[in-house]
Amino acid sequence: MTDTAIEIKNLHFSYGRRKVLTGVNLNVPKGSIFGFLGRNGAGKTTLIKTLLGLQKSSAGTATILGMDCFAHALEVRKRIGYMAEDQQMYGWMTVGQIIRWVGAFYPNWDNAFTDRLVDMLRLSKQTKVRALSKGQNSSLALLLALGHHPELVILDDPTLGLDPIARKDFLRRVIDLLQSNGVTVFFSSHLLYEIEPVADHIAILDDGVIRKCGKTEMLRETVRKFIFTPKPEADLASLPGLLDLTVAGDNIAVTLEQCDAQTRHKIRELSQTAMEESALNLDEIFEACVIGNKTPAPQPAG
Amino acid sequence: MFIRIEPSSSVPIYRQIIDQIRYQVAAGILKKGDKVLSVRELALQLAVNQNTILKVYNELCRENVLKIERGEGTYVLAEQHTISTQEKRDMLAGPLRQAAALAIQLDIPLDLAAQLLHSEYETILAQRNSLSGGSKESPHV
């Protein structure tokens, strides 16, 4: 048995000539909550469509629970749950009717379990789907993704459009209903601060590739910003793990990933003054990973 | 147990929780023998991954601040005075380091900075004493 729930190797995907994914590598450990981050349009949903077996990649492989996502799409779908962003469901059905409707597609649907979920999520089987609030709508979508006891649940920006309280409620359910039962969760979002508290691992997708991937706490512990005045001959582009470089007069600010004692030593060598080191908050880390400037600007004249 | 996570902080979440629990024991808010929330309960309350809370509890157990009784729950093991002077100093060192850096940036000499700390300390102590009507003594470390 493998300990990996999702394994993606060198995955490429294009819409016509537009390349969306250009060599994605990703491993999602079983039982983990995996935060999958990217800006809108970064390719998150394209990757999820590939995982769901809805499209064939141009190159590379994607497997779920050891099975190829495209070749074994049906078998994969029996064992995973999926919840879309702003999921649309038949508005004229009642909650009870839509549960029966969706359940009929799954041989192992657990009616007793979904009844318990209806109570726990404070839904009513008599309510028409169109009359649900946004928060209730997301509760129902989650319920429909769980009724067949999936081993892996894919949540595509599930909290989009929810207010802060409904959002926190949703995250609590992910912890209580999924993590407590050992279900692997692949959770996409464009908000790092939302995903950080619940995720074991985080990957940041940008421009078709994974920019950063690792244990969640590593993000804050290893990304550092240094401000110093470089020696005139300093080769800043050679700094390891450079995410961002900004020049302000004689001073420069560099943001580095995987910062350790060796990195600090290297900066001290390049610097002609004392350096100032600071940790970054999540928004700053996300920004540095996604829109960081990696080329040293020309030195200002004079 | 009141714990607050500061999302915009640069300190990792598990570190924020550890610091707050340790502080609450050192300040006598959590007392020896108090039962703390289970991993699952605290994870739900804070909407934080259970493994994060598990990591917090394991580390605090290693430091003998908490004790996990199998099947019963997690209890405070340390007494207020068993938090060593060294640990209390460590808790204070972080904010003081920031204050020192700020003083240097603003070109405030050390004796003036020390004077400011002294007067802030006295002010808060005076406020506390007038509230509790209690002893006028400084806390001893």
Image (spheres, coloured by chain):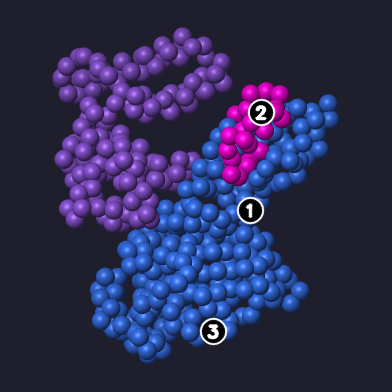
Chain colours: A blue, B purple
Q: Which residue is mark 3?
A: A72
**Where residue B116 sits: x, y (%)?**
41, 15
Amino acid type at image mark 3: His
Q: Which residue is mark 2?
A: A268
- Which region is colored magenta? A254-276
Which of A157 and A77 lies nearest the eye of the viewer?
A: A77
Mark 1 residue element: helix
Q: Chain of mark 1?
A: A
Q: CA distance from mark 3 to mark 2?
A: 54 Å
Q: CA distance from mark 3 to mark 1?
A: 34 Å
- The N terminus of chain A sits in image quarter: bottom left
Residue at 21% x, 40% y: name it: B76
Residue B88 visible (yes or no): yes
Q: From what the image shows, is residue A75 above or below residue B96?
A: below
Dots 1, 2 in contact, CB < 8 A = no
Q: Quadrant of residue A261?
A: top right
Q: Earlier in the sequence, mark 1 or mark 2?
A: 2
Within 10 Å of disc 3 (Cα), the crowding (few <14, some 14-19, many 20+) is few
- The C terminus of chain A sits in image quarter: top right
Q: Is A134 inside the magenta-drawn segment?
A: no
Q: Which numbered disc covers residue A290? A: 1
Q: Is A260 inside the magenta-drawn segment?
A: yes
Mark 3 residue element: loop
Q: Earlier in the sequence, mark 3 or mark 2?
A: 3
Amino acid type at image mark 2: Arg
Q: Earlier in the sequence, mark 3 or mark 1?
A: 3
Q: From what the image shows, is residue A214 above or below residue B141?
A: below
Amino acid type at image mark 1: Val
Residue at 65% x, 70% y: name it: A11
| Residue sitting farthest toward the right | A301
| Residue sitting farthest toward the front | A1
